[in-house]
Image (cartoon, rainbow, N blue to C red):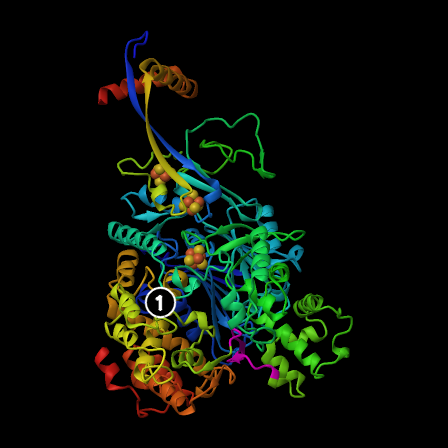
C-alpha cells in the first residue's frame, strides 16, 4: 500500500472486551491486578491499588469493570450521567482517568496515578485470566498506522506535558533524559 | 512482619465508648490459626460460663479468617462468635460476601465488642480511623436499608456493612446479621448485636495484606482456579445436580426443585409431599424465579456466583442465596412467589431463614390443635399467607404471642406448656434444624447431627458421598481421581458400600469407619472456619479444590507458618476441642447430643450408643463427651484440664479414654 508519506507501520492493538452482563461483582480482577503489581510481585495484595476497578451496586444492578487510563490534571468542567436500560450510572462511571475528582486509580498512600499496563511481561492480562465469568475478554489485532499519526500523538502528549509543567521544565527534563539514555 | 493476617484486633468497649487497637500474639496464630480458632481461644479466656448471652460481659467477635484478603479464591468468610441466647452455648455462625477482606484491608483481623452501648450506635472503621456513631435515626430500619443509608451518609459507596434489622434490635433469638448477599444467621448472634445496641459495623480499608512466599502462594491459587474450571466442566456423575458441582448449593440457578419439595418436610417439619412436583408447578416456579432474579452474584474473589439479586414486583430489591429460597414456601404450604416475597421482608427484619418459617408453622399448628387460641392471635388474617406475614411482624416486634415465639420453638413450647413441647419436635440443642424426616437411620448423619457444634448439618457434612452408588463400576470411577481423601482407606470404605445387602446401612459403614468419615468431614469445616474459606469450595462439595493436602501449603506460603498435614490436623483438633470445652463448661453433655427423635423412623439404640462411644473415644472425649485430661494434654490444652478439674467437671488422673489407634496418629 502506498501512502504519501511512504511508510506504514504495524501496531498491535490490545483490547479488552468488557461484557458487563456477565460480571458477577466478585472483584477477583482487582485482587490479581494489585497482587501482580506489588513489589516484589505477588508479595502483597490490596484492591485499592488495582488498575481495574469494579463499580458495583447490586441493588441497582450496576457492575462496571473500569480500567485505569491516563492521568489528568484537571477534572472535567461538566459531569455526565448515563441512563442505559433504565439504570442511571453515576457521573464519571465509565471514565478511565486518574482524576482529582475521585480516589480511584491512585496509589492509596502516595496518591500517585495508576495506569493499566496490560500486565507487561505476561502472556495475557491477568484480570482476564482470573475472570472465570468471562466478563473480560482479551483480543489482539494488528493495525497499520501511519508514522505521522504517532508523531502527532507524541506532539499532543508533549503539548499536554508542557501545559502542565511549563515548556522550560519539560525541556530540562528531556535534556536530562537524553543524557541518561 | 505479619503475613496473611494483620496482627491487630480492634477492641471496642461499648459501655465506655473506648476503642483500642491491640497487637495479637503470633504464637496464637500457630496454635489456633485464626477466625474460629482464635475466636474460641478468646471466648475461653474471657467469657466464663456464668456469663449469659445478654450480659455486658458477653463478647461478640467479628473475625476475618486467616487467609481472607489474600488472593486465595473464595476466602472471604467473616466468622462471628459469641454466646447464643437460644442454645446458651457458643454460637459461631459465619457469612460470605465482602466484609472480612475489607476488614483485613482496613488493618484488623477481628473486631471484638464488649459491654453495651447506652444508645443505638454504629461503628465506622476506616483504616486507622474508628468511630462509634449515633444510629438513632436508623432504629427500626431494615438491614439492607440501613446499609444503603449509612453508605450514603458517609459518602462511601465502597464501604461494606454488616447490619441488623428490627429482629436483632428486639433480641429475637434467631435474629441474623445481614451483609448484602450474605448473612450470619444461626444461633441468634443478631440478637446479641442488638442487645449491645450496635446497629451496624461499617468497614472500608485500603491497606496491603502481605504474603510470606509470593511465588509459591500465587502458584497454589492458580492451581485452585484451574481445578475449579476442571470441576465446572466435569460435574460428578450419579449424584443430583446440586451435589455434582462446586459452590454453595446453586439454589438461585436451578429450577428443578423436585428433590427438595418432595423429600424435605412442609409446614412445621411434618408433611412429606411425594408427587408434589409436576410440569405446571415447574413451569410456574421457573417463571417466578426468572422474572425475579436480576443477576447471579458472587462473594469476594470467587467465581461461583451462588447468590442472586431478587426483585419482586412492587418490593425493594434484596439478595438471596441457598435454601431460604424454599423455607418460607414450604413452611407455609405455599408457592415460590410467596416465598420470595416474604423473604424480602424477612431479610430486612434480619431473621434466620431456617428457624423463622418453622417457628411460624409451629405456632399455627398449636392454633389448629387448640393449644393456642383466638385470644393469642387477635386480628390475625384468615388467609394462610397473610397469617405468616402477620406472625413475622409480631415476632420481630415481640408483640403479644410474637414475644413468646421470638425465643424459638424450644423455649416457646416451654413457656406455652399445655403439651406444646410435642410440637417443638425439630430441634437439636434447642435450635431448629433442616426439616427432614427419613426412614432408615444413617449412621454417618446420626453422628454428625448429634455431635456437630455448629448445629447445622450443612456445616459438618461434605466430602464423603451422602449415599452409596448403585454399581461397583460407578464407585471405581468415582475413587479414581479422588485426591482429596486424607487416607487411602476412605476409598475402600466407599468402594465396598452397597445400597442393599450386608454392606449397607445402618451397619455399613461400620462404626470405626463412620467415626473416621465424620471426623474427616468435620475437620474440613473447622479448617475452613479458621482460614475464612467458603465451605462451597472446600468442606461442603464432593471433590473440592481445597483439601487437607494443599491447605498446609497455603498456610505456609501465605502466613509463613510452617505447616504440614499433621500439624494442621493437630491445630484443627486443638481448637475444635476448645469449642467443645467451652460448651462443656456451659453444661453441654452426652444427653444433649441427639437428633430429633422423629428424624428417622427406624432407629437402632444400641448401634447409636456405640457410635457415640467410639466417636468420643476417637476424639479423646470420655463417655459424657468431655475431653479427657490426657487428650487435652496432647493438644497443649492443659489450661482447660485445670479449669475442668477446678470446676469438678473432670477429676485429677481420671481414667482416660483415648484409644491406642489415635495414640499412633499423634
Ligand atoms: S473478575 Fe470478572 S466477574 Fe469478577 S468483578 Fe472482575 S470483571 Fe466482574
Ligand atoms: S490488564 Fe493487568 S494491569 Fe491492566 S487492569 Fe488487568 S491485571 Fe491490571
Ligand atoms: S462458593 Fe458461592 S458462597 Fe462460596 S464464596 Fe463463592 S460465591 Fe460465595
Quarter of the image with the C terminus of chain B in it: bottom left
Element class at badge 1: helix
Q: Is residue B149 left or right of residue B606?
A: right
**Residue B205 horizontal/vertical position (percent):** 45, 49
* In the foreground, A105 or B491: B491
In the rendered structure, does residue B278 fall within the stretch colored magenta?
A: no
**Residue B149 horizontal/vertical position (percent):** 61, 50
**Residue A36 horizontal/vertical position (percent):** 31, 43
**Chain label for disc 1:** B
* In the foreground, A101 or A119: A119
Q: Which secondary structure class fits the magenta region best?
A: loop
Quarter of the image with the N terminus of chain B in it: bottom left
Q: Residue at x 32, y 59 (%)?
A: B545
Relative to B529, does residue A97 appear above or below in the rendering? above
Relative to B134, does residue B622 appear above or below in the rendering? below
Relative to A37, does residue B160 appear above or below in the rendering? below
Q: Residue at x 75, y 70 (%)?
A: B382
Q: Residue at x 39, y 53 (%)?
A: B69
Q: Quadrant of ligand 1?
A: top left
Q: Is residue B306 left or right of residue B373?
A: left
Give the class, few, some or many, for how many residues have Cα within 10 Å of label 1's Cα (few <14, many ≥20). Answer: many
Relative to B567, does residue B595 appear above or below in the rendering? below
**Residue B444 horizontal/vertical position (percent):** 38, 79
User: Quick check: can you spot residue B8?
Assistant: yes
User: Quick check: can you spot residue A109?
Assistant: no
User: Which residue is labeled 1 in the image?
Assistant: B527
Q: Quadrant of residue B164?
A: bottom right
In the rendered structure, does residue B426 fall within the stretch colored magenta?
A: yes
Q: Quadrant of residue B277?
A: bottom right
Q: Which residues are magenta?
A: B423-436
Amino acid at each position: 500500500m502506498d501512502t504519501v508519506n511512504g511508510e506504514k507501520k504495524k501496531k498491535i492493538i490490545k483490547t479488552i472486551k468488557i461484557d458487563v452482563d456477565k460480571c458477577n461483582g466478585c472483584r477477583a480482577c482487582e485482587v490479581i491486578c494489585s497482587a501482580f503489581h506489588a513489589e516484589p510481585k505477588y508479595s502483597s495484595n490490596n484492591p485499592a491499588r488495582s488498575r481495574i476497578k469494579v463499580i458495583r451496586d447490586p441493588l441497582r444492578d450496576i457492575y462496571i469493570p473500569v480500567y485505569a487510563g491516563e492521568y489528568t490534571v484537571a477534572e472535567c468542567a461538566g459531569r455526565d450521567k448515563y441512563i442505559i436500560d433504565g439504570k442511571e450510572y453515576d457521573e464519571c462511571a465509565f471514565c478511565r482517568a486518574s482524576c482529582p475528582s475521585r480516589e480511584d486509580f491512585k496509589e492509596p498512600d502516595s496518591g500517585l496515578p495508576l495506569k493499566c499496563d496490560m500486565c507487561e511481561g505476561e502472556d495475557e492480562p491477568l484480570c482476564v485470566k482470573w475472570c472465570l465469568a468471562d466478563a473480560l475478554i482479551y483480543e489482539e489485532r494488528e493495525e497499520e498506522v501511519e508514522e505521522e499519526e504517532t508523531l502527532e500523538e507524541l506532539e499532543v502528549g508533549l503539548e499536554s506535558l508542557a501545559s502542565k509543567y511549563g515548556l522550560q521544565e519539560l525541556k530540562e527534563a528531556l535534556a536530562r533524559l537524553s543524557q541518561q539514555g | 512482619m505479619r503475613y496473611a493476617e494483620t496482627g491487630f484486633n480492634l477492641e471496642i468497649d461499648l459501655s465506655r465508648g473506648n476503642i483500642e487497637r491491640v497487637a495479637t500474639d503470633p504464637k496464637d496464630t500457630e496454635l489456633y490459626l485464626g477466625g474460629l480458632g482464635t475466636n474460641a481461644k478468646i471466648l475461653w479466656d474471657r467469657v466464663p460460663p456464668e456469663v449469659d448471652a445478654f450480659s455486658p460481659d458477653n463478647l461478640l467477635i467479628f473475625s476475618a479468617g486467616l487467609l481472607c484478603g489474600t488472593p486465595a479464591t473464595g476466602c472471604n468468610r467473616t466468622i462471628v462468635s459469641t454466646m447464643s441466647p437460644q442454645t446458651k452455648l457458643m454460637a459461631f455462625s459465619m457469612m460470605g460476601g465482602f466484609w472480612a477482606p475489607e476488614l483485613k484491608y482496613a488493618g484488623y483481623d477481628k473486631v471484638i465488642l464488649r459491654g453495651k452501648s447506652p444508645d443505638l450506635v454504629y461503628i465506622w472503621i476506616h483504616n486507622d480511623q474508628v468511630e462509634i456513631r449515633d444510629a438513632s435515626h436508623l432504629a427500626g430500619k431494615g438491614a439492607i436499608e440501613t446499609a444503603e443509608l449509612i453508605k450514603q451518609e458517609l459518602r462511601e459507596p465502597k464501604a461494606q456493612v454488616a447490619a441488623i434489622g428490627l429482629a436483632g434490635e428486639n433480641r429475637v433469638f434467631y435474629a441474623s446479621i445481614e451483609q448484602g448477599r450474605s448473612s450470619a444467621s444461626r444461633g441468634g448472634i443478631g440478637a446479641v448485636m442488638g442487645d449491645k445496641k450496635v446497629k451496624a459495623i461499617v468497614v472500608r480499608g485500603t491497606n496491603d495484606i502481605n504474603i510470606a512466599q509470593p511465588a509459591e502462594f500465587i502458584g497454589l491459587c492458580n492451581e485452585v482456579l484451574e481445578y475449579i474450571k476442571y470441576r465446572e466442566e466435569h460435574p460428578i456423575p450419579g449424584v443430583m445436580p446440586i451435589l455434582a458441582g462446586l459452590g454453595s448449593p446453586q439454589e438461585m440457578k436451578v429450577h428443578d426443585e423436585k428433590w427438595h419439595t418432595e423429600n424435605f418436610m412442609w409446614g412445621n417439619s411434618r408433611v412429606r409431599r411425594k408427587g408434589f412436583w409436576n410440569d405446571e408447578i415447574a413451569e410456574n416456579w421457573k417463571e417466578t424465579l426468572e422474572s425475579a432474579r436480576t443477576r447471579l452474584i458472587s462473594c469476594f474473589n470467587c467465581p461461583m456466583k451462588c447468590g442472586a439479586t431478587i426483585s419482586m414486583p412492587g418490593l425493594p430489591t434484596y439478595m438471596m442465596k441457598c435454601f431460604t429460597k424454599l423455607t418460607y414456601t414450604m413452611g407455609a404450604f405455599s408457592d415460590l412467589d410467596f416465598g420470595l416475597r416474604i423473604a424480602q421482608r424477612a431479610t430486612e427484619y434480619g431473621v434466620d431463614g431456617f428457624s423463622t418459617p418453622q417457628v411460624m408453622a409451629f405456632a399455627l399448628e398449636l392454633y389448629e390443635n387448640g393449644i393456642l387460641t383466638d385470644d393469642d392471635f387477635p386480628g390475625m388474617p384468615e388467609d394462610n399467607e397473610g397469617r405468616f406475614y402477620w406472625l413475622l411482624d409480631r415476632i420481630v416486634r415481640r408483640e403479644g404471642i410474637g414475644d413468646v415465639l421470638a425465643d424459638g420453638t424450644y423455649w416457646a413450647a416451654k413457656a406455652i406448656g399445655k403439651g406444646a413441647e410435642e410440637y417443638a419436635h425439630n430441634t437439636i440443642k434447642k435450635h431448629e434444624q433442616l426439616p427432614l424426616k427419613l426412614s432408615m437411620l444413617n449412621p454417618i448423619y446420626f453422628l454428625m447431627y448429634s455431635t456437630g457444634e455448629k448445629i447445622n448439618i450443612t456445616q459438618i457434612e461434605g466430602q464423603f458421598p451422602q449415599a452409596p452408588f448403585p454399581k461397583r463400576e460407578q464407585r471405581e470411577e468415582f475413587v479414581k481421581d479422588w485426591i482429596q481423601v486424607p487416607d487411602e482407606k476412605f476409598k475402600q470404605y466407599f468402594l465396598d458400600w452397597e445400597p442393599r445387602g450386608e454392606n449397607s446401612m445402618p451397619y455399613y459403614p461400620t462404626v470405626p469407619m463412620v467415626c473416621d468419615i465424620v471426623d474427616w468431614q468435620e475437620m474440613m469445616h473447622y479448617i475452613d472456619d479458621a482460614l475464612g474459606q467458603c465451605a462451597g469450595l472446600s468442606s461442603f462439595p464432593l471433590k473440592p479444590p481445597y483439601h487437607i493436602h494443599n491447605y498446609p501449603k497455603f498456610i505456609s506460603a501465605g502466613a509463613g507458618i510452617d505447616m504440614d498435614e499433621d500439624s494442621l490436623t493437630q491445630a484443627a483438633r486443638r481448637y475444635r476441642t476448645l469449642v467443645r470445652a467451652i460448651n462443656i463448661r456451659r453444661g453441654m453433655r452426652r444427653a444433649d447430643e441427639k437428633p430429633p427423635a422423629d428424624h428417622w423412623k427406624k432407629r437402632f439404640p444400641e448401634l447409636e450408643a456405640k457410635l457415640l462411644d467410639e466417636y468420643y473415644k476417637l476424639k479423646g472425649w470420655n463417655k459424657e463427651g468431655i475431653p479427657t485430661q490426657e487428650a487435652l494434654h496432647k493438644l497443649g490444652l492443659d489450661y482447660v484440664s485445670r479449669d475442668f478439674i477446678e470446676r469438678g467437671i473432670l477429676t485429677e488422673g481420671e481414667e482416660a479414654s483415648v484409644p491406642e489407634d489415635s495414640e499412633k496418629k499423634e
